[in-house]
Image: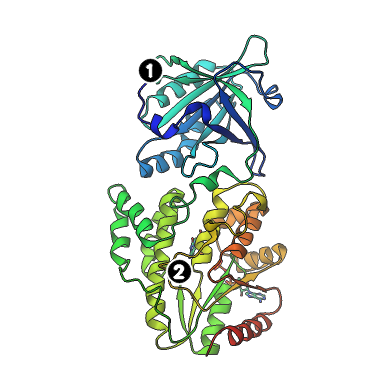
Amino acid sequence: MAKRSMSLLGQWSSRVFSIDLDKRGALLNFALTEKPQQAPEKFRNIQERCYSVLVCGDDRIQSARFYFGLEDLLRNELPAECELLPVSSYLPHVKDSLIRGYFLKDASECPSLTRRVLGALGLSEQVQVCSYLRGPDGGRWSQQLWSGSENQNMDVSKTCYVVPSEEANYHPSVLNMENSDVFYCRAEACKVLQESCDIIPESRAVLELVGKTDASRHSPDFPVVVIEGLDATGKTTMTESLREALGARLLRSPPQCLSPWRAVFDREPPLIRRAFYALGNYITAEQMGKEASQAPVIVDRYWHSTASYAIATAVSGPVSSLPPEGSPLYRWPPDLLQPSLVVLLTLDPQERKRRLEARGQGQTDEEQELDHNLLFRLRVEEAYRRVRGPACVVVDAGPSADKVLQQVLLLIKEHCRL
Ligand SMILES: Nc1ncnc2c1ncn2[C@@H]1O[C@H](COP(=O)(O)OP(=O)(O)OP(=O)(O)O)[C@@H](O)[C@H]1O
Ligand SMILES: Nc1ccn([C@@H]2O[C@H](COP(=O)(O)O)[C@@H](O)[C@H]2O)c(=O)n1
């Protein structure tokens, strides 16, 4: 079978498959071998009819969009008794080797419907379907790669056996984060939007706004202070108070000029959405450079937000599934202007919820996720603390607005020449 995706799949039998059993970090890992083997103990209670659907087309924009819509597509087409679990397949320690998809446990009365749906999917350029069979003794599990023919024939030459695999000491998504979730230079983020111009015409308008000058080495005359934090931690209150107290200019990232297109990019998969926010920082940086030649500048969100949300969303589970502290994934993009000080406002979750409710505004999907998923909130906050260049200074935003303001003013006095 000469499916174009085989180049991406690499050596089939060297791959590890990692099934995300829940959002709490329970990963079931298995590898493949060409010799028949007993199945891992953990697989004994998985029912007979299982499949994996991996998205592995060569066009990264199309693949990202296809994967983004795949869960809905499968839920709409498959019998309701099919359980869907996110699955990643990767070559251990090989950067950019990760392929995503879904692992499917079919408990329906109608196996032929499931096979028909998967057979049709397998014809697509973007998808690789496998089924898993229990051997006659019940102990062996084999994986068959589908040939992609209309009859859902299996390519028997691609049969492999499932064996347990060691748990990786980081989440598999870490392998593909650079230039998929986090962009460490303007050119890489621009490339994504350039590649998406045909399907997202708004990309052109964004690219036109991104300047080309490298202001990173220019040291502004006045201090630039960034205020970061989860939603409702008091960033707006703080940035407006600081503007008044210091006679400062107030900027935000993403900048106002991107507002008309933000909702469009918020509906796109991480690859495109994160590239948009990365570019927002470069536009804000240009504004910072100009404004800081005349007065102090206060910025509501900047690089720490972009990197932390992206990293924390790409992995699942507890804080330990984040890239380890000191990982280059927490570095500052060398071509992005560095602020003089970054303050991270933190808040007890209950108080944050109380303030959100008191404010009574609608929540974005990601805000709702923060509410429902304490682990996600913890990951974002920990990622904030790990980003370097400069590292953030953590301030408890629990006390009264005036007390928190006084504390931040003190920090500005300590860290910046005014
Ligand atoms: N120190 C404080 N004590 C009590 N309430 C506060 C304090 N700071 C801000 N608030 C209130 O909490 C709510 C959220 O604050 P604010 O809008 O400044 O947060 P934010 O971080 O900018 O939120 P978002 O990122 O969602 O826009 C507002 O109603 C604000 O008046
Ligand atoms: N510099 C930034 C700013 C924001 N984001 C993303 O936007 C969401 C939060 O924005 P709010 O307007 O609600 O404060 C957050 O989910 C981030 O994903 C970003 O990436 N970079």
SS assignment at label 2: loop
**Residue 54 left/right relative to 126:** right
Q: Residue furthest top?
A: 136
Give above or below for 2 relative to 308.
above
Q: Nearer the viewer, residue 222 or 229?
A: 222
Which circle marks residue 253 in the picture? Answer: 2
Give above or below for 367 relative to 40.
below
Percent from the top left, x then y, of residue 329? 53, 56
Residue 364 in view (yes/no): no
Kind of residue indicated by mark 1:
Ser
Kind of residue indicated by mark 2:
Ser
Q: Nearer the viewer, residue 232 or 59?
A: 59
Distance from label 2 to label 1 (Cα)? 49 Å
Count residues near mark 1 (Cα–Cα under 10 Å), then give few for <14, some for 14-19, many for 20+.
few
**Which quarter of the rendered image does ligand 1 occupy?**
bottom right
Q: Quadrant of residue 213 in the image?
A: bottom left
- First in sequence, mark 2 or 1: give its number: 1
What's the residue at 57%, 17% (across, down)? 35
Percent from the top left, x then y, of residue 25? 66, 43
Give above or below for 257 relative to 141.
below
Residue 195 in view (yes/no): yes
| Quadrant of image for the N terminus | top left
What's the residue at 66%, 18% (across, down)? 38
Q: Nearer the viewer, residue 167 or 349?
A: 167
Q: Quadrant of residue 326 in the image?
A: bottom right
SS assignment at label 1: loop
Residue receiving disc 1: 149
**Residue 292 left/right relative to 372:** left
